Amino acid sequence: MAKVIISCAVTGGIHTPSMSPYLPITPEEIARSSIEAAEAGAAIIHLHARDPNDGSPTPDPAVFMRFLPVIKQSVDAVINVTTGGGLNMTLEDRLAAPLVAKPEMCSLNMGSMNFNISPAAARVKEWKYAWEKPYLENTDNFIFRNTFRDIEGIVERLGKAHGTRFEFECYDIGHLYNLAYCLDRKIVEPPLFVQSIFGILGGIGADPRNLLFARETADKLFGDQYVWSVLAAGRHQMAFTTMAGIHGGNVRVGLEDSLYIGKGELATSNAQQVAKIKRILEDLSMEIATPAEAREILHLKGGDRVGF
């Protein structure tokens, strides 16, 4: 069995500050949390930025540049910068920081979709900032745009221009077929790092049968040309990543995907989630990949060829 790559999504653009006091907000908090996660065993750190004044998602490259170099100088982890950004950002907004940073890896969503997190608003009793409640509630009328032209343009501007490779985020089975279309047309090149995502309202549900079906479909479409990873939202996080490991996959955890470490218990850090899934996988006799091994598996360009 190949070594398991652990990715950690540190803050994201979905959860809001009122949901957890442990969500990293400022550049200093994001840097510290990323370094701790890498030291706990994460080979890849997936990053969004937030306005340090109110915690709202921001595409500002200047904010990214307050934490990207700090992380790079402190740990050897692969830095993966979002191209998904936050809700309501334009495509140009979403690409602003990646085009400056030229990272080893970026996320790339493989289709447009409804992305509804409005039910989360009902669970918050007190709001820290005025932007949070409408940000969440308005997602019942939100479409996350990623057209085929958008996808090809991102690959051209980042992948072919700067050597960045991608974490292909697949929220549904149809997204795997979208990626297969791109592979057939040679828009993307193997090995593909395929991130199957479960439990987002608007995407495929967190049913164990769906995880197996996603794996079978990816095997059929990509054969030996892909590396598979899994993340699941909220309470499904640890169960699904454990199941992915058992079925030969890699895993992603982090406060972007779930704010909890156990039932009703908020995670106090990203490192806490990384340490938990690392322990589970090692208890199941799996070996954890180092950043150097992840770079080799995914054919990454190396941290010396980025823009920060």
Image (spheres, rainbow, N blue to C red):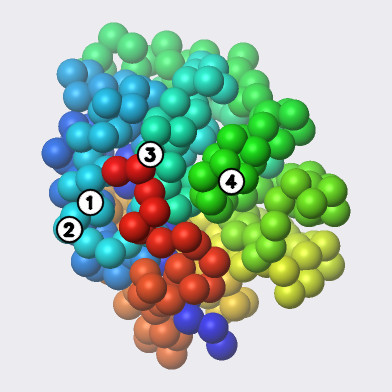
Residues 71 and 175: in front is: 71
Cα–Cα gap, marks 2 and 3? 17 Å
Residue named by callout 3: 101
* Residue found at x 29% / y 9%: 130
Q: Amino acid at mark 2?
A: Ser
How many residues crowd mark 1 within 10 Å: few (<14), some (14–19), many (20+)?
Answer: many
Mark 1 touching mark 3, by CB under 8 A? no
Cα–Cα gap, marks 4 and 2? 26 Å
Mark 2 touching mark 1, by CB under 8 A? yes
Residue named by callout 4: 159
How many residues crowd mark 4 within 10 Å: few (<14), some (14–19), many (20+)?
Answer: many
Mark 2 touching mark 3, by CB under 8 A? no
Secondary structure beneath label 3 = helix
Residue named by callout 1: 71
Location of residue 249 with respect to 83 vertically, above or below: below
Q: Amino acid at mark 4?
A: Gly
Secondary structure beneath label 4 = helix
Cα–Cα gap, marks 2 and 1? 5 Å
Name the N-terminal-most of marks 1 and 3: 1
Q: Is residue 269 left or right of residue 201?
A: left
Percent x, y of residue 6: 41, 66
